[in-house]
Amino acid sequence: MTHHRHSVSAPDAPDAVGAYSHAVVSNGLVFCSGQVALDPASGELVEGDIGAQLTRCLDSLATVCESAGARLADAVRTTLYLTDLPGDWSAVNEAYGAYFTGAEPPARVAIGVAALPKGARVEVDAVVALPD
């Protein structure tokens, strides 16, 4: 069986802060690298509460998905990494729910972590289905 894969670079998303692709496409799925709340123009962490940071992460993931020919609305799974899981849980659920308003939100995992790049409070990655 032949597996085809190719990397995706999203010019309108924040630059990668390490040696990785914004996403890799393989077998009808887009595997998006984690996004922290960086402003795409400045590369600096956005100001604001956890809701603002999460929204910026999701906006960046949406940009990556578009560069791969997909939509974040077609995510099959997201993973959230949070530096204050218990303290931010309610605000995260509110901001996340506002972003995924469809009847079928993706599967989701939330993991508490000690620290994230650039002092971010949240990082989000996703696996997204390409359109048929």
Image (tube, rainbow, N blue to C red):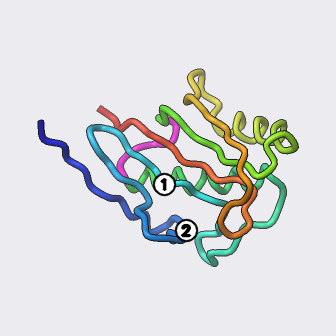
* Rendered position, 106 above or below 32: above
Residue of label 1: 33
Residue 69 inside the magenta-drawn segment: yes
Query: What residue do we see at 78% from left, 49% from top?
Result: 51
What secondary structure is marked by label 2? loop
In the rendered image, residue 57, in percent from the top left (x then y), is placed at 63, 54
Q: Residues within 10 Å of mark 2 (few under 14, many from 20)?
A: many
User: Which quarter of the image is occupied by the C terminus?
Assistant: top left
Query: What residue do we see at 26% from left, 38% from top?
Result: 27
What secondary structure is marked by label 1? strand
Q: Residues within 10 Å of mark 1 (few under 14, many from 20)?
A: some
Residues rendered magenta in the picture: 68-73
**Which quarter of the figure has residue 60?**
bottom right
Please, what is the three-letter code of the amino acid marked with disc 2?
Pro
Residue of label 2: 14
* Rendered position, 93 above or below 12: above
The number of numbered discs placed on residues in the rendered structure image is 2
Please, what is the three-letter code of the amino acid marked with disc 1?
Ser
In the displayed structure image, the side of residue 12 where residue 94 appears, left or right: right
Circles 1, 2 touching at the beta carbon (< 8 Å): no
In the rendered image, residue 82, in percent from the top left (x then y), is placed at 73, 48
In the rendered image, residue 113, in percent from the top left (x then y), is placed at 71, 50
Choose the circle earlier in sequence order: 1 or 2: 2
- Camera-near label (1 vs 2) is 1
Question: Of residues 59 and 121, which is closer to you in this image?
Answer: 121
Residue 98 inside the magenta-drawn segment: no
Query: What residue do we see at 67% from left, 41% from top?
Result: 111
Query: What residue do we see at 60% from left, 21% from top?
Result: 103
